[in-house]
Image (tube, grey):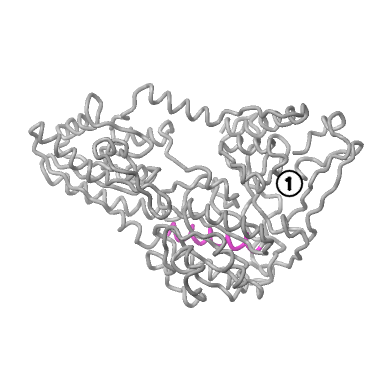
Amino acid sequence: ILPKEEEEEEEVEEGLGVAVEADHDSPEPPRYRHLQPAQKALPFSATCVRISRDSYPNLRALRNASATTLRDDDAAFAKLDEGDYGYVLDDVQHLTDYLPELPTFPNPLQDHPAYSTVKQYFVNADDTVPEKVVVQKNSPRGVHFRRAGPRQRVYFEPEDVKACIVTCGGLCPGLNTVIRELVCGLSHMYNVNDVFGIQNGYKGFYSSNYLPMTPKSVNDIHKRGGTVLGSSRGGHDTHKIVDNIQDRGINQVYIIGGDGTQKGAYEIFKEIRRRGLKVAVAGIPKTIDNDIAVIDKSFGFDTAVEEAQRAIDAAHVEASSAENGIGLVKLMGRYSGFIAMYATLASRDVDCCLIPESPFYLEGEGGLFEYIERRLKENNHMVIVVAEGAGQDLIAKSIPVADQLDASGNKLLLDVGLWLTHKIKDHCKSKKMEMTIKYIDPTYMIRAIPSNASDNVYCTLLAHSAIHGAMAGYSFTVGMVNGRHAYIPFHRVTSTRNKVKITDRMWARLLSSTNQPSFLSKEDIMEAREAERLANRLPVPASSSEHTKKHSASVLSNACGGRQSA
């Protein structure tokens, strides 16, 4: 990372070489220039520094600023642009990073009749989106991502583009909408005619024929649930996939899937770069659980919450129609309880919500059984919502089983809804309480429905942003960050998961709505707060060079302070 101007005369050694990258929207390829001791360094706002394994200690600036763990093999792909007042751009990969002599072409959108009324056709090359928007007066500017949108220059001629689309993992509302908008967007905005569908997930790259797709063939698919391309878990063989991409002349790959799928996309990009292929890889994150890191939400989440509320309404009707009636609804949420939390808040009929992030216990003072007894006496009925990943530790204690994994590497979960139903029945029987319990599992009904109006719009924007980025030569995961669409490095969305913070105000709102106990002791709450605080602590990196020590500490304090403040 470039030294500060005031430190340069004292600390820059003779012959220091700094890689300065030209703007990707410019037709000029990136160049390298050597700064002599007598020369002034470029201002931070005008420089983009290429980080390699040799400068790995400086990557702590990004690691700590974003509270993520950067693996050693990710170091060679991290791109940081440091600016004034603690600004850090966590940039995405570009074709010119390894193919510096590529030509550029005018963007066809400048002659597109639909865009003739737009005040500004193209995104400014310097536009970025902040990761955190809540700051204090003296907060550093913090980590930013490159803003999504059309660029003035593109790296592909429309007639040369051969694009492919693949969907992986479980089903989710909105998959067909994203597929439709990718095909129609490529055709209508950029005049691309060669678009192919990869059938049945990653294995479709090497085990089945590619399916030609046109705007006419996908015209009505957004009205259907599921994915017209089919989907599967596993089947990822990086070398076989890239071999087929290379053999078929594919130069744009659009990959729709969750965090495991995005990890696969990252591996595909690495192999493409290693072979020096002119191929852009665009990831569109899909997870109905809403557990993808960095982004505001994933597509299909709003639809899932809306449909989950219907199941809760049915459980409430069943419970209120019986003496001491209990309606138990199991919703999706392997690691994150967002669907359960938001559906509970939207319904207002739920008396207890159990999620993976908030452990609970059954017996004893303040336990679930005590709360159930009290609620039935007060109200004569109650509704319980439980996320599928909740209480797995309790089930494992009562039903010892060997850990098993699915094809995606996820741990197979035991049915917490069924287990909880039997436990509640046994408890009420021991207390000689008459009780009726109805267990509803709408999981596959929710996954299989078409997306609602809100998600349809969101899917369209994601698809168009992905197309603009791929045409401009970037490889990335696209998503909405603080209400703005941005291009996010693969490693940022695969290194951690988005989870409900039980020390956050949103969870407090839920507890206030349901009047349920938190099931947490003061020690548990303090432990959760301490864990969150430690996650944002910023260790000063050790370095053999005194200059590197001083500068790294400066970058950490400037770039990372925004994270702490936010």
- Which residue position holds label 1? 50
Is residue 171 magenta-colored? no
Q: 390 or 542: nearer the eye?
A: 542
Q: Position of residue 377 (x, y in %)?
A: 14, 32
Image point 47% across, 42% down: which residue? 498
Q: Is residue 194 above or below residue 343?
A: below
- Kindly state the secondary structure of the residue where label 1 is placed: strand
To which quarter of the image does residue 420 belong?
A: top left
Q: Quadrant of the C terminus?
A: top right
Assign the magenta stretch its main secondary structure.
helix
Image point 67% across, 40% down: which residue? 88
Q: Quadrant of the N terminus?
A: top right
Total label count? 1
Judge from the rendering whether residue 325 lies leftward or rightward of residue 499; answer left or right: left
Q: 224 or 512: nearer the eye?
A: 224
Q: Using the rendered image of the protein, determine whether residue 114 is visible from the camera's viewpoint.
A: no
Q: Using the rendered image of the protein, determine whether residue 330 is visible from the camera's viewpoint.
A: yes
Judge from the rendering whether residue 107 lies leftward or rightward of residue 564; answer left or right: right
Q: Is residue 403 above or below residue 369?
A: below
Count residues near mark 1 (Cα–Cα under 10 Å), then give few for <14, some for 14-19, many for 20+: some
State the residue lying farthest toward the top.
522
Q: Is residue 238 above or below residue 72?
A: below
Q: Is residue 343 above or below residue 63?
A: below
Image point 31% across, 48% down: which residue? 331
Q: Residue type at mark 1: give it.
A: Arg
Image point 38% across, 63% down: which residue? 450
Q: 387 or 460: nearer the eye?
A: 387
Q: Which residues are magenta?
A: 453-471
Q: Position of residue 93 (x, y in %)?
A: 66, 53
Q: Position of residue 249 (x, y in %)?
A: 62, 72
Is residue 454 magenta-colored? yes
Judge from the rendering whether residue 344 lies leftward or rightward of residue 68; answer left or right: left
